[in-house]
Amino acid sequence: SNNYFVVINTTDPDRGRSSVVAGGAPAHPEI
């Protein structure tokens, strides 16, 4: 599951960084 959220979030660089820092968890509720 981690990789799923990381890949989704990399469409927006800021979200990508946030999800990686969170260990791959969705950094934003809308994701």
Image (spheres, rainbow, N blue to C red):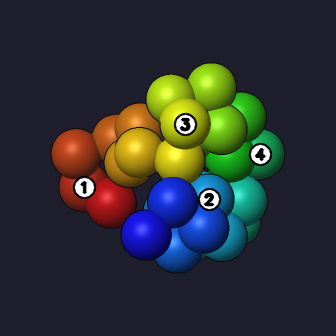
Q: Residue 8 at what x, y percent from top left?
A: 57, 70
Report the Cα–Cα distance between label 3 and label 2: 9 Å
Does residue 5 lie above or below 21 as drawn?
A: below
Report the Cα–Cα distance between label 1 and label 2: 14 Å
Evaluate if marks 3 and 1 touch, with contact meaning CB atoms under 8 Å apart: no
Label 3 neighbour load within 10 Å: few <14, some 14-19, many 20+: some
Q: Which mark is residue 23?
A: 3
Does residue 8 lie above or below 16 as drawn?
A: below
Q: Which residue is mark 1?
A: 30
Q: Which mark is residue 6?
A: 2
Q: Residue 14 at what x, y percent from top left?
A: 69, 36
Residue at left 38%, top 48%? 26
- Earlier-in-chain disc, 1 versus 2: 2
Q: Which mark is residue 14?
A: none
Evaluate if marks 1 and 2 touch, with contact meaning CB atoms under 8 Å apart: no
Report the Cα–Cα distance between label 2 and label 4: 10 Å
Q: Which mark is residue 13?
A: 4
Residue 16 in sight in this render: yes
Report the Cα–Cα distance between label 3 and label 1: 17 Å
Residue at left 62%, top 59%? 6
Amino acid marked by disc 2: Val
Residue at left 52%, top 73%? 4
In the image: residue 13, left or right of residue 18: right
Judged from this view, the residue extending furthest toward the right is 13
Q: Residue 20 at what x, y percent from top left?
A: 66, 38
Residue 18 in sight in this render: no
